[in-house]
Amino acid sequence: MSLALMGFAAVAVFNISSCMSSNNQDDVAVYEHAAFYSSPHFTTFVSPPSGNTSILANVYIEIPDGRRFLLAQLPANVTSEILGVDGWEYDGELNYSDSHSHIEYRDGQLVMARISGDSEKFRIGPTEDGPFLSFPIERDQLIEVFGEPVRWKRLVTRYGGA
């Protein structure tokens, strides 16, 4: 089932990580409550996108031991175990970060997830039964598993002053 079919619609997105292409443009597959960033493969998943901190995408995460969790139900202790880091508190949130991922909890609830790079710690799928994709994700794989995005967005990365 595609994210578009699960009631997802376009939202404003601006959240970029380490996925910059040689031509300084990045494609973004925009779904409501989630975005996938590419350069040239989709290397970053963010939910929710910047500006919308209330609803997480209805996607599933699979961890290396095969356990699967609805993103919103991924326990903080499992995040700590998988990322191999202790959480740190900032502004009332418990944060877990490694070189590929950043996951935030508030009052014990997951409120934001960014999974980037060649992370083999998390795979992502539209249902508990999968299929699950590993990063980096090819454009055709993304569309096959999650459906056509509500829209595509082109980000232009600018460097330097005015």
Image (cartoon, grey):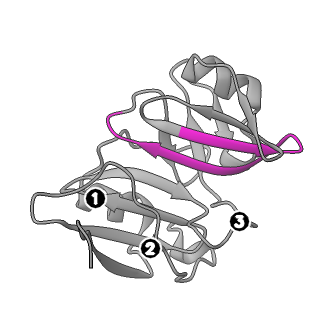
Q: Is residue 131 visible?
A: no
Placement of 108 over or under 19, stated as above or below: above
Placement of 140 over or under 80, stated as above or below: below
Q: Nearer the viewer, residue 8 or 45?
A: 45
Between marks 2 and 1, how big is the CA–CA gap? 11 Å
* Residue at the disc numbered 1: 38
Whether residues under marks 3 and 1 lie with C-beta atoms below 8 angstroms apart, the answer is no
| Mark earlier in primary sequence (3, 1) | 1
Q: Is residue 104 visible?
A: yes
* Residue at the disc numbered 3: 53
Q: Secondary structure at mark 1?
A: strand
Horizontally, residue 65 falls left or right of residue 99, namely right
Q: Nearer the viewer, residue 162 or 102?
A: 162
Whole-percent x and y of residue 66?
A: 56, 23
Between marks 3 and 2, how big is the CA–CA gap? 16 Å
* Residue at the disc numbered 2: 30
Whole-percent x and y of residue 146?
A: 44, 62
Residue sitting at 46 percent across and 63 percent down?
Answer: 15
Magenta span includes 110: yes
Magenta span includes 43: no
Which of label 3 and label 1 is nearer to you?
3
Looking at the image, the residue that sits furthest to the front is 161
Highlighted magenta segment, given as a residue range: 102-118
Quadrant position of the C terminus in the picture: bottom left
**Among the 4 quarters of the image, the one containing residue 128:** top right
Query: Which kind of residue does numbered mark 1 sit on?
Result: Ser
Residue sitting at 57 percent across and 74 percent down?
Answer: 32
Horizontally, residue 151 falls left or right of residue 127, namely left
Task: Report the predominant secondary structure element of the magenta stretch.
Answer: strand
